[in-house]
Image (cartoon, rainbow, N blue to C red):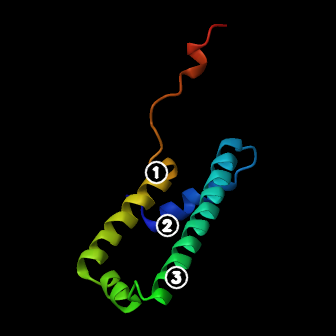
């Protein structure tokens, strides 16, 4: 995995002029972040409603979130998600792009 300094240097290149593909990809990432916010808001609303109705005990929910098993799961999932999202820039495909040779002239 790339060092933090290498990752920062690679991410700084994302702002290159004329890089339409990266611009589109970053647009999708921002759109997905917006969708994530909506899901988080729905989860918060649901948690509050269940807590207010007495169906959910937020103290027990918080304790479950701090358990060793949950912390191990979070660490594994966070690392996997980070690698998957940043893979395009941290470990780009080294295959030669031959798409132009596949099309008939």
- How far apart, in angstroms, are the residues tagged by discs 2 and 1? 16 Å
| The C terminus: image quadrant | top right
Instruction: Give the mark, 1 or 3, whose residue is nearer the N terminus.
Output: 3
Q: Residues within 10 Å of mark 2 (few under 14, many from 20)?
A: few
Residue 5 circle label: 2
Residue pictured at 53% horizontal, 78% vertical: 44
Mark 1 touching mark 3, by CB under 8 A? no
Camera-nearest residue between 40 and 93: 40
Report the mark closest to the observer, 2 or 1. Answer: 1
Instruction: Locate residue 68 relative to residue 8 in the image: left or right.
Output: left
Q: Which residue is mark 3?
A: 49
Q: Is residue 86 above or below residue 42?
A: above
- How far apart, in angstroms, are the residues tagged by discs 1 and 3? 38 Å
Q: Position of residue 71 (x, y in %)?
A: 30, 77
Q: Position of residue 11 (x, y in %)?
A: 58, 59
In this view, which residue lies farthest toward the top?
A: 105
Report the mark closest to the observer, 1 or 3. Answer: 3
Q: Is residue 88 above or below residue 103?
A: below
Q: Position of residue 73 (x, y in %)?
A: 30, 69
Camera-nearest residue between 63 and 3: 63
Report the mark closest to the observer, 2 or 3. Answer: 3
Q: Which residue is mark 1?
A: 87
Q: Residues within 10 Å of mark 1 (few under 14, many from 20)?
A: few
């Amino acid at each position: 995995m790339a060092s933090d300094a290498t990752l920062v240097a690679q991410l700084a290149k994302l702002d290159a002029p004329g890089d339409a593909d990266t611009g589109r990809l970053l647009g999708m990432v921002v759109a997905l972040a917006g969708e994530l916010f909506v899901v988080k808001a729905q989860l918060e609303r649901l948690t509050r409603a269940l807590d207010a109705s007495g169906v959910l005990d937020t103290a027990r929910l918080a304790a479950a979130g701090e358990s060793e098993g949950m912390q191990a799961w979070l660490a594994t999932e966070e690392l996997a998600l980070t690698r998957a999202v940043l893979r395009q820039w941290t470990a780009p495909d080294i295959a030669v792009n031959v798409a132009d040779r596949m099309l008939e002239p």
